[in-house]
Image (cartoon, rainbow, N blue to C red):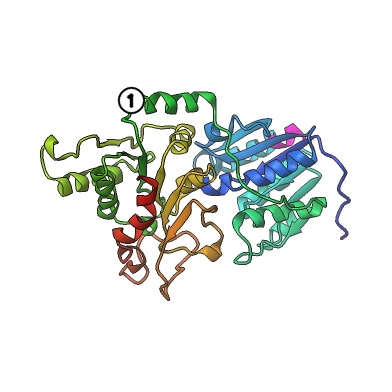
Amino acid sequence: MPKPQLPDTFRKIAVWNTAFLGDAVLTLPLIRALKAAFPEAQIHFYVRKGYYDLFCAHPDLAAVHEVDKNGALRKWSAFRRFGKECAAVEFDLWISPHKSLRSALMAAASKAPARIGYDAPLYNRLAYTHTVPRQFAQLHEIERILQLLTPLGLAMPARPWPVPALPDAARKAAADFWETLPPGPVLGIHPGSIWPTKRWLTEYFADIAVRALWLERTVLIFAGPGEEDTAADVMLHVASILGEGEEVMPPGAKIINLAGQLSLAELAAYFQRLSCLVCNDSGPMHLAWTQGVPVTAVFGPTVRSLGFFPRGENSHVAELNLPCRPCGLHGHNTCPLKHHHCMTWIRPDRVWESVKPTLI
């Protein structure tokens, strides 16, 4: 069956990416390219529940919709109702970088006359009017997503850099908090990740924190909801290294645990002011490097060819060349080989090499 001819312009465009935080952030170049090509179009962004405040201020978006994919949308009745709501908007173009069956079904339910997705899995060819190859392991995720522009005849942007746009309230919260800090460079540490095998050891993060404290710098510990114990463990290791008593803290140094206290937009705004962020391969990593913040990320189960490395001259990755890497796209709950050498063998000295110059 021949593919339907695409129109020259669109009134309402839906971009659906309900994957993890980093995936949603890396979709921003696609949105920017669509807005540049169709400036009069209303672009709606469908994201996972909890991400609204990170994207709601973006000037290219007419609306941001949260999708409770792990909650209400698990029920078929709720799924059908949500599909009808999407259809009622009367989108004339639907683009989905997310390749799950549920995403394909929602694309079909939208009844948009033009629907673009990847050509695999096989069910995508039934749900979308136009498909493109994902070219996994050949392109970075940003370029993979931008391939979805091909059926529209649009060229790939020359510099496809995600540009977050944060609400004024989040920026003000960060500015007000910075007024309370001592002057000088500030190191951020985010030890969390959804996948346990992607997490560097908390005692190693603590080692980096203590080195910054001995330079009389401020250290901020970040962690999202549910990761408070991980941040607390870093703080305990810091205390253990320094010893007991306030007098052991170097003069002018300060460490603050902000775990679970910030919205996503506030987290991004705080990151924007850091001298450096040390983190794992995680969504927060993408919030930092996309804003030009110096990042040192520890990569274990995942590798560059998967397409999610941080970009820019300020980004550094600490990793080891091991035959067992990568062990999966996302990592695992436990190391398949039961040793976790990809993380335990990356020592703090190696990470500190790229962190120290940002703090002196």
User: Residue 88: within the magenta?
Assistant: yes
Under mark 1, the amino acid is Thr
Residue at image position (47%, 35%) is 264
Residue 53, position as x, y percentages in the image: 53, 31
Say how many tags the image has. Answer: 1
Which corner quadrant holds the C terminus? Answer: top left
Q: Is residue 186 visible?
A: yes
Which corner quadrant holds the N terminus? Answer: bottom right
**Furthest residue toward front:** 360
Residue under label 1: 180
Give the side of residue 231 with respect to residue 238, left or right. Answer: right
What segment is highlighted magenta in the picture? Answer: 86-90
Q: Is residue 222 visible?
A: no
Observer-nearest of 356 and 24:
356
Residue 66, position as x, y percentages in the image: 57, 35
Q: Secondary structure at mark 1?
A: loop
100 shown above or below 225:
below
